[in-house]
Image (cartoon, rainbow, N blue to C red):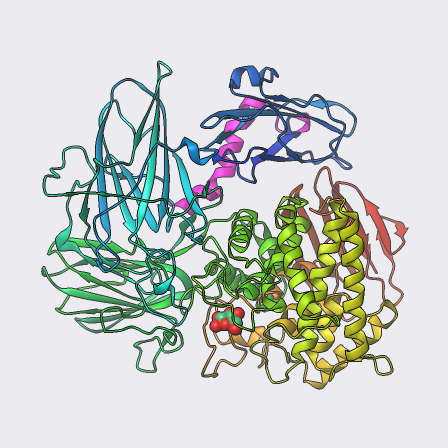
Amino acid sequence: MKAYLLKLLYPCLLICLVLPLSGKASGYADIQPIALKCEHLENPIGVDAAHPRLSWMMSDNRTGAKQTAYRIVVGTDSLAVRNGKGVTWETGKVLSSNNLVIYNGKALAAFTKYFWLLELWDKDGKAIPAKQVSSFETGMMGMENWKGTWISDRNDVNILPAPYFRKVFSAAKKVKSARAYIAVAGLYELYLNGKKVGNHRLDPMYTRFDRRNLYVSYDVTAQVQSGKNAIGVLLGNGWYNHQSIAVWNFDKAPWRARPTFCMDLRITYSDGSTEVIASENSWKSSPSPITFNSIYTAEHYDARLEQPGWNTVDFNDSRWRGVTMRAAPSKNIVSQVMHPIRNVEEIPAKTMQKFNDTTYVYDLGRNIAGVSKIKVKGEAGTVIRIKHGERLYANGHVDLSNIDVYHRPKDKNDPFQVDIITLSGNADEFMAKFNYKGFQYIEVTSSKPVELTKESITGYFMHSDVPATGTISSSNPLIDRLWWATNNSYLSNLFGYPTDCPQREKNGWTGDGHFAIETGLYNFDAITVYEKWLADHRDEQQPNGVLPDIIPTGGWGYGTANGTDWTSTIAIIPWNIYMFYGDNKLLSDSYGNIKEYVDYVTQISPNGLTSFGRGDWVPVKSQSSLEYTSSVYYYVDAVILSKAAKMFGKQSDYAFYSTLAEKIKTAINTKYFNRETAIYGKGVQTELSVALQWGIVPEEFKARVAENLAKRVAADGMHLDVGVLGAKAILNALSDNGQAETAYKIAAQDTYPSWGWWIVNGATTLYENWNIQATQDISLNHMMFGEIGGWFFKGLGGIKIDEQQPGFKNILLKPNFVSGLDHFEATHDGPYGKIVSSWKRSGNSVIYKVTVPANSSATVYFPLAGGKKAYKGTQMLTDKLAIGAGNYQFEIK
Ligand code: BGC
């Protein structure tokens, strides 16, 4: 069954399975702890944290539902745990509504499955019995537990084919459980007895390989059989052995080498004994049919070189060579505890145009990041070239000229986004394993005639497979489409780290990452990706506090523009993770790094103003002062740091950095704010917007500055005049300060320059340039203008974070019933469950419905401008109402 069908049916299956057991379809049976997670994942394996985080939701749809106490029992014996008998940790009944708790029991042992049971007490103090036991399993928990050696084949970086590795071993006794732990510098596919283990793609995630390597854990109990078994490993280059040449010099990265891996296959037999089959000297290696693979450009494959059964027991490997032992790429090998990259969506071709029997062009109907799969039969030795691009020339052929501009190939052997396959003469099937691309169109050319049909090509949308957590639906199809396109770009740029674009660069541009953070977190449960990316930040930070433009980097990006408007990721990302999840671990882990960063900026900017930055990138027409915008981000960092200092009880830091923040703000306002006119700088959209968005404007001037911004937008014909910094700020700046009507008008604008202009011109992703005719900076899949996808939740749905009770413990609901929309609904699955904010016009009134999940609360702010009144039934309300969990309906008229 197709994966998406399974996903759809899953809830029904669950209900069918659970109902007969629990006996009742409603009432107390539905009240239970749900979504139990460890390190923000359900039942993870390979957890290395000594004090993992446990979190949950409470399913209880009664009005005012809340958790008054919890009790956690953790142990290694699931039955004992089920009976409430803790072995390693037992919290006792804790009177608290917390739903995120840090494990604080006995020291956890490596390679151990821990079961945990959660009991809650409801609003009436009644115990809610736990329904199911959840689990987490520890991994290596330290370098010393590895048994394997890093091995590679005997080739150097100049040898192109991807290597196979194999090892046959015997499982002497009955297998009780088996785990595979594989650490790779480069990329891998792991096979057991001929079958691929797991469905991860492009694993492990990209890190700065000489500082930190990731290992991946699999439960392979079902794949290991008693008796003989074969392990197969195929290694790809990824970012580790970057062969393609482009302007960022990844081919010269200090870590570059032939891919290598270390693996422990740990078997526990039913008699309790364990055995580890590890990577070592006796493994064998051979070149695979993948004759070339570049994460950046493409993959080449010669089907004539296939070795059927290479990863099975009976394969004759007498012609294979031995391996070479290698030093570990770094001394820091840690578990990859995150949602992996997958082929998430299968996209059939929408159209095929046959030019002749050697040239075909396919259109997927939408722009994606990922790969294509081709099924083709042709004469042995036929060479097929599969070119992937975002645009077509007028003559219908694929045009790469908007995305191949930074590629510097030394010869014709590494064409951009072109897979090259050589046919075997049998029916061949090919899909790149160690590369992905950004594309909508696929041009297939063949050295000899081949017969292809529309079904011969399929697209696969790949990305970090983070669960979706947000929805938008409205009466304006343009808004709904924009939201969808924004998410498409967000996901196209999420590959274990956020990228700028999936084709031209695939770089972890810092600025693009934080411009997109709120949109990302309203729509997806992406904490695991950001926690990993901030670890990449910590790896990259210079001793003086400076961070590079792109992270990870092979050394490029320490220029002069890598300043606050881009590299403030170090503060902005952890802060937003805390805001959206109520989890301050990342902020705590990054605290010292934020401090070093802010101290560096302070050292080069003694008067409180800094020009360390890039400025309002890709603007429509107006420029804003670089010193002004960079100083605003410097202020943002100092504020985050001072708030973090306060939360972590660092009193002197708090005093120091809050004073610094005030100093920066004063310096900005003294130089750039005209109190007479209530204008910042020259008064262009970006200058007015960033001051409002980032809290620079003195309270008493906010309304006037926002009015000036609205006037500026009107004078600009209700169109945007911003680059990335303005695009991040302008919608919030308006809707947070009484100008929601103007915000909506520019959000729903469909002529140039606007987001909608892209959509009416056929965009299914966001672009890099407002001007679709521009000749540079014209990727068609960029996330840097993507704040609008988060703004829908805030500015129209009004679902906002309460900084005093983050993680949507208390939700601020501040909807704007803007003219031009008849209805609007936003939902967000936060840490407590689904939040719904939905409004609909009905005659002269607006019906406003909200859902506040159990164990959280909300403060509703009714928009009552123009003398409107809010009602709950017949009861008239004031403009502000505090509510507990439940479903509510209000009428505003
Ligand atoms: C990238 C951007 C990035 C910018 C910074 C571009 O090449 O694609 O998204 O932020 O450079 O200058």
Q: How many marks?
A: 0
Q: Which residues are magenta?
A: 1-28
Dominant SS of magenta comes to: helix
Residue 881 is one of the magenta-drawn residues: no
| Spot occupied by residue 819 in the image (x, y as percentages of width and height) | 73, 70
Q: Is residue 580 left or right of residue 295?
A: right
Image quadrant holding the N terminus, namely top left
Can residue 481 be seen here?
no
User: In which quarter of the view is residue 561 placed?
Assistant: bottom right
Q: Position of residue 379 (x, y in %)?
A: 9, 61
Q: Is residue 427 left or right of residue 249?
A: left
Residue 382 x, y percent position in the rendering: 13, 64
Identified at 83% across, 79% down, the residue is 678
Relative side of 22 to 633, left or right = left
Q: Residue at x 88, y 70 (%)?
A: 700
User: Is residue 377 among the parts visible in the rendering?
Assistant: yes
